Image (tube, rainbow, N blue to C red):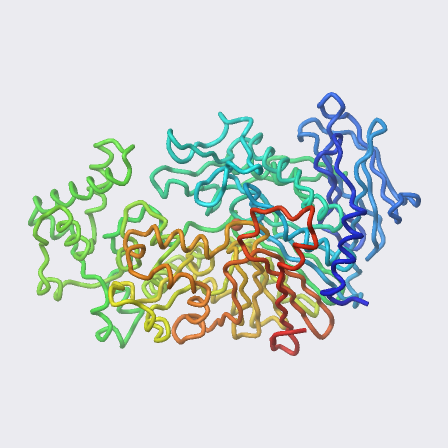
């Protein structure tokens, strides 16, 4: 009987843990399997010889019984010395929907025995159950969520989907990692890493192949992660942290545009380690063995793929990092710049333009204006140069002057010029009367960008209404390319795959969300909570995370339009470190479970808002932010944010989700544990852990979603 064992979980758990295989010195990362098809699966281990070197040959046996008596296939594998002892092999000729047990060995040393399961044949109406996990930061954090999954679901899930942030590339980011904990990592190849922070308080990010390998090796020493891999095949896609925080393509964003962070070699190092250590069907040659070449690596990386799992489930997994364009508002966008001028804006808005014109930013054409008043332009360029130097102490004077001159060319916001003058202690040059007759457009400033190098106003805290218009203009201008998060090739594949799928349930696995992440401070329920000191310019709709589809609003509409054409479409997503169950009001539901261990979304939002020079000073802001998840939910339910409604949210938890897929229902179980437990290991106390979890259930049936089974 396939049923959630909510109460009987403990019994299953105790058996599971007692019978667990144990990694040993010859196979310190244990074993793993992944990417099952009806007749194949990828098997994985890492072998270390008695002398610490890499053994030249490893044997693999695959059996149908846990005692490895009935061996059905096997092979002797010549270990390629290039891959850090990793042995990854695709085994085929297997039977559909069968459990297999596998073991690697060399020189009389055997690995733990892993269990895996092949997929059912496409025509099979086999019900499916799978887990969704993501974001497993290791530094100072324990994988208690995996222990709960092992306890309750040992026998009853078919596979695990990992939606990214399998590793974090940093080892001591002071914003969310505790490098003093016993779960610390210090790079062996510190020279090869990137130093972040400052010289007095440095922290490091992986850059060399050795750095990325070390992260995977270390994460894989966690006994819960090992047991997860020993029990179930996993399908993994990457998000940003497998390479670099908030990355797009090969470009990292640590310096918010102060430096050019495009680094193909670093991106390729990260991918190489990923293909080595993750049991993905990639980086393998025709013989099914590891062989990672240039054609596997950026810009040719190919991890998007689909899995037809019987007639009930078609799982479509995407890559939202490798081919995505830059964030629409670059981190180094000059706040005073006008990317959308009045004629374009007036044409987009149409008849309503005269009525809303006053909401936009008056601007001056420095080319025209500066000609008559060269001194004015020179003064402004110097003020802007000064701004650049203040925000980037490493800038030399001449570069700063050049940047200042470039910033004060073309159309520039009169509001921003007035602000700059006021900050320099000068009388603002534009009177309200002058402002009234100037043309009006969208400046980066009125999208929330107040600094010349910042993630705020770019990747976070962007004003929704102006962003949407700016984004629409960019979308039209570039024929969609400015928002093509999948890249054109993947996008065509995605459309074709979803539209032609014969499966009952089509599940789109994205690393990041389409759920609205907006706080609408104009919503009457929210406005009523705000203190009188709350600044007027923030009484607006604020996009909290513009790093995901919230920063690509027309692309989101495009994907939701596609999904509307697909019966029984369910989106699963990761990245955000919080639970969201969302009704996109087009027959599509989106499920985002909590992160396994990474700092919760509420913790991150609280830190960002409280450290904001304006928001952080608002009286009572901490109490307002205590209801952060509720603010997002209320905003989504109110008019004017988007049609999508958040039905359930929890921004303070860790956990995972289990999906139960049958011909007539798609049942979602989300297990949540309060985030403050993540620094405590319950590995030796599973009974105490069990009590800390709360199950949340939803079921999709006949196109509608309802709480409960
Ligand atoms: Fe994450």
Query: Image quadrant of residue 622?
Result: bottom left
The N terminus - image quarter? bottom right
Is 693 in front, or is 328? 693
Can residue 280 be seen from the camera position used here? no
Can residue 657 be seen from the camera position used here? yes
| Residue 343 x/y as whole percent | 24, 65
Residue at image point 76% right, 23% down: 50
Q: How many marks?
A: 0
Residue at image point 13% right, 49% down: 421
Looking at the image, residue 251 lies above or below residue 659: above
- 369 sits left or right of 249 in the view: left
Is 576 in front, or is 146? 146
Query: Image quadrant of residue 60?
Result: top right
Query: Image quadrant of residue 642?
Result: bottom left
| Residue 169 x/y as whole percent | 52, 39
| Residue 648 x/y as whole percent | 53, 69
Looking at the image, residue 84 lies above or below residue 506: above
- 34 sits left or right of 516 in the view: right
The C terminus - image quarter? bottom right
Considering every residue shown, the one lying at the far right of the view is 69
Considering every residue shown, the one lying at the far top of the view is 51
| Residue 528 x/y as whole percent | 33, 73
Is 218 in front, or is 310? 218
Looking at the image, residue 618 lies above or below residue 57: below
């Amino acid at each position: 009987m396939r049923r959630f064992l909510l109460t009987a979980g403990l019994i299953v758990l105790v058996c599971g843990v007692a019978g667990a295989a144990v990694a040993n010195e010859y196979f310190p990362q244990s074993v793993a399997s992944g990417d099952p098809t009806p007749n194949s699966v990828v098997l994985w281990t890492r072998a270390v010889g008695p002398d610490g070197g890499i053994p030249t040959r490893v044997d693999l046996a695959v059996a149908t019984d846990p005692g490895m008596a009935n061996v059905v296939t096997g092979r002797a594998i010549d270990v390629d010395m290039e891959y850090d002892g990793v042995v990854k092999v695709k085994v085929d000729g297997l039977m559909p929907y069968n459990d297999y047990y596998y073991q690697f060995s060399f020189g009389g040393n055997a690995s733990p025995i892993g269990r895996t399961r092949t997929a059912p044949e496409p025509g099979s109406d086999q019900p499916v159950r799978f887990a969704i996990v993501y974001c497993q930061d290791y530094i100072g954090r324990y994988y208690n969520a995996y222990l709960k999954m092992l306890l309750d679901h040992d026998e009853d899930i078919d596979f695990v989907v990992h939606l990214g942030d399998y590793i974090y590339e940093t080892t001591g980011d002071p914003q969310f990692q505790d490098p003093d904990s016993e779960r610390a990592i210090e790079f062996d190849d510190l020279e090869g890493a990137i130093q972040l922070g400052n010289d007095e308080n440095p922290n490091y990010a992986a850059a060399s192949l050795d750095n990325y390998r070390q992260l995977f090796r270390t994460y894989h020493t966690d006994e819960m992660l090992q047991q997860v891999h020993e029990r179930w095949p996993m399908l993994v896609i990457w998000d940003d942290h497998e390479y670099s925080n908030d990355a797009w393509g090969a470009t990292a964003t640590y310096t918010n545009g102060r430096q050019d962070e495009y680094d193909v070699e670093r991106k390729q190092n990260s991918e190489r380690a990923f293909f080595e250590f993750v049991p993905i069907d990639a980086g393998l040659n025709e013989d099914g063995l590891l062989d990672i070449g240039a054609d596997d690596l950026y810009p040719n990386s190919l991890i998007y793929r689909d899995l037809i799992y019987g007639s009930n489930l078609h799982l479509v997994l995407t890559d939202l990092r490798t081919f995505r364009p830059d964030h629409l508002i670059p981190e180094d966008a000059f706040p005073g710049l006008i990317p959308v001028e009045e004629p374009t804006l007036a044409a987009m808005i149409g008849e309503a333009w005269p009525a809303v014109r006053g909401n936009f930013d008056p601007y001056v054409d420095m080319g025209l204006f500066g000609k008559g008043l060269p001194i004015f332009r020179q003064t402004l360029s110097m003020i802007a140069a000064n701004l650049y130097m203040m925000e980037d102490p490493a800038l030399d004077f001449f570069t700063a002057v050049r940047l200042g001159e470039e910033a004060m060319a073309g159309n520039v916001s009169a509001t921003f010029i007035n602000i700059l003058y006021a900050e320099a202690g000068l009388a603002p040059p534009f009177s309200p009367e002058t402002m009234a007759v100037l043309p009006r457009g969208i400046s980066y400033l009125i999208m929330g960008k107040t600094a010349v190098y910042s993630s705020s106003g770019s990747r976070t805290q962007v004003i929704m209404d102006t962003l949407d218009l700016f984004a629409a203009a960019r979308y039209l201008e570039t024929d969609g390319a400015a928002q093509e998060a999948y890249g054109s090739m993947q996008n065509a594949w995605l459309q074709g795959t979803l539209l032609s799928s014969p499966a009952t349930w089509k599940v789109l696995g994205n690393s990041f969300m389409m759920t609205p992440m907006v706080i609408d401070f104009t919503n009457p329920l929210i406005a009523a909570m705000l203190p009188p000191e709350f600044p007027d310019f923030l009484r607006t709709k604020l996009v909290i995370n513009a790093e995901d589809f919230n920063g690509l609003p027309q692309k989101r509409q495009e994907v939701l339009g596609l999904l509307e054409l697909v019966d029984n479409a369910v989106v699963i997503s990761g990245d955000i470190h919080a639970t969201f169950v969302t009704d996109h009001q087009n027959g599509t539901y989106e499920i985002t479970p909590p992160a396994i261990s990474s700092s919760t979304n509420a913790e991150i939002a609280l830190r960002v808002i409280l450290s904001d020079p304006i928001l952080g000073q608002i009286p009572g802001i901490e109490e307002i932010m205590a209801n952060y998840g509720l603010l997002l939910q209320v905003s989504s339910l109110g008019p004017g944010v988007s049609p999508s409604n958040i039905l359930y949210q929890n921004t303070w938890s860790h956990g995972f989700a289990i999906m139960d897929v049958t011909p007539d229902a798609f049942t979602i179980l989300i297990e949540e544990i309060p985030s403050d437990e993540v620094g405590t290991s319950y590995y030796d106390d599973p009974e105490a852990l069990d009590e800390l979890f709360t199950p949340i259930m939803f079921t999709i049936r006949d196109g509608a979603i309802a709480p409960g089974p």
